[in-house]
Image (cartoon, helix red, strand yellow):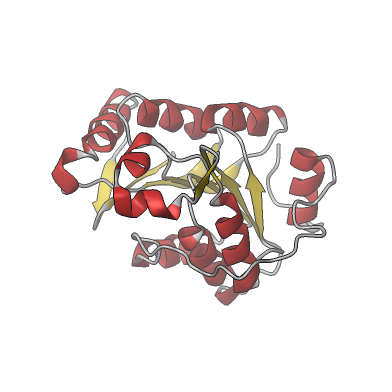
Amino acid sequence: MFLIMKNNICDTVVRLLHNGENPWTGYKVGTTNFHNSWGSTEPCFEHFIKELRPQLVIEVGSFLGGSAIHMADMLEESGLENRCIICVDTWLAEEVLWSRPDERKLLKIEHGSPTFYYTFLNNVEFSGHSDTIIPLRMPSLSAGRYLKMKGIRAPFIYIDGSHIQGDVWADLNMYWDLLLPGGVMLIDDFSNEENGIFDGVIKDATTFAAMNDLKLEVWNKKAFIRKP
């Protein structure tokens, strides 16, 4: 089981997930330097990182890198020299972002395919955290099975992938198995604002907690569950 590593944890993650080929090797950063602030710097991140002091964080849904970069800042400020954040995303976006003109622009669609993965890479590189943040460009469920296969578990997991009912349920179930006992799962967009587009998050998170006899707590527009 992947718990606390004495060796460089990101090197271990790269070896396990990328066959030792670091995604950052030879990457030439572009000029784009924009990352969203959609709840990416909420106080809950700092609180849980200070409480848990996680060497490893798994983020499901990274978009432009805002929350991953903020968590990397918090890990650094907490004095955790041996640290790593695995960012799971397809970087293809869900239908909500495709259907909204302002958000669609952020996807940088070329020849029918989003290219904002490179915005994410640029933002991470500009932030100075490419030594901490390791992308895993896979669908969330495939990535979860892959992480489980490799024996990777984490004490802090942030769920911010698809917001559609059923998709959220699948992510919660998959990544709950990857959360270490005593760890925290943080769930984004637990909010009835935005004309109901986050209703799936609320319904699935509430049902998941109830069916597993877990306490679901709310912090601003995020929810969290502690694993016994």
Q: Quadrant of residue 33?
A: bottom right
Residue 192 visible: no
Q: Position of residue 142 (x, y in %)?
A: 59, 27
Q: Quadrant of residue 199?
A: top left
In the foreground, 185 or 25: 25
Residue 27 visible: yes
Residue 87 falls left or right of residue 15: left
Above or below residue 38? Residue 179 is above
Q: Position of residue 17 (x, y in %)?
A: 74, 39
Q: Residue at x 56, y 57 (%)?
A: 120
Q: Position of residue 9 (x, y in %)?
A: 74, 55
Q: Residue at x 61, y 26 (%)?
A: 145
Q: Residue at x 68, y 46 (%)?
A: 3
Q: Position of residue 38 (x, y in %)?
A: 34, 60
In the foreground, 104 or 41: 104
Q: Quadrant of residue 39?
A: bottom left
